[in-house]
Amino acid sequence: MDFQTAVKTCFQKYTDFSGRASRSEFWWFILAEVVVLIVASFIHQIVYLVAALGFLLPVLAAGSRRLHDIGKSGWFQLLMIIPLINLVLIYFFVQPSQPEANAYGQPPGV
C-alpha cells in the first residue's frame, strides 16, 4: 500500500475498529501523523492541538486494526499508558501479518 492510499484508507475507516490493517497501511499513516504534527507545532500550539485531536480517533482505529492483523486484541493499545512496557506494543506493530484468516477477518488486500 502506498502513502496516499494508506492515509486515505485510515481516515475513511476512522471509526472502524474491526477488521485488519497491513503493516504498510499503519506505518504510512503514522508517518503522515508525525509530519503533520511537526508542521503544526511550528505554526502554533492551538494548530498542533487541533491536528492532534483530529488524528486521535483514526490512529486508535488503525492501531486496533493493526493489532487484529497479528491476531491480538485492540485493547493491547492500553499498553501505551505504561512507560517502557509500551515497547511491547511497538514490537507487535512491526510483526508481519498473519497470512491466513483469523478471528478478525481475511488478510488485508484479500
Image: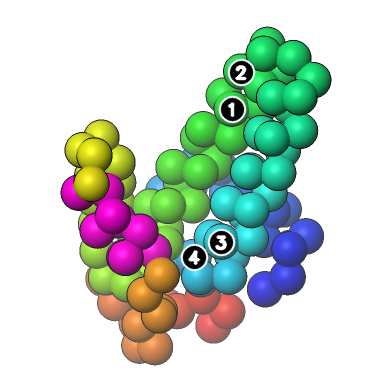
Query: Quadrant location of the N terminus?
Result: bottom right
Q: Are marks 2 and 4 in contact (CB under 8 Å)?
A: no
The answer to whether residue 51 is left or right of residue 85 is right
Distance between mark 2 and mark 4 Cα atoms: 26 Å
Q: What kind of secondary structure does the magenta stretch mostly adopt?
A: helix
The amino acid type of the residue labelled 1 equals Ala
Magenta stretch containing residue 49, yes or no? no
- Mark on residue 52? 1
Residue at which label 4 appears: 21
Label 3 and label 2: CA atoms lie apart by 22 Å
Picture layout, residue 64 above or below residue 108: above
Quote the CA–CA distance across marks 1 and 3: 17 Å
Tag 2 residue: 49
Q: Magenta span covers which residues?
A: 85-93
Q: Is residue 50 visible?
A: no
Q: Residue at x 51, y 43 (%)?
A: 59
- Name the amino acid, label 4: Ala
User: Which quarter of the figure has residue 97?
Assistant: bottom left
Residue 85 lies, in percent from the top left, at: 20, 49
In terms of secondary structure, where does tag 3 sit? helix
Amino acid found under the numbered disc labelled 3: Trp
Residue 27, disc: 3
Q: Looking at the image, tell me whether mark 4 or mark 1 is earlier in sequence order.
A: 4
> Residue 19 location, x and y as percent?
42, 62
Color scheme of the displayed model = rainbow
Question: Do the CB atoms of the residues marked 2 and 1 lie less than 8 Å apart?
Answer: yes
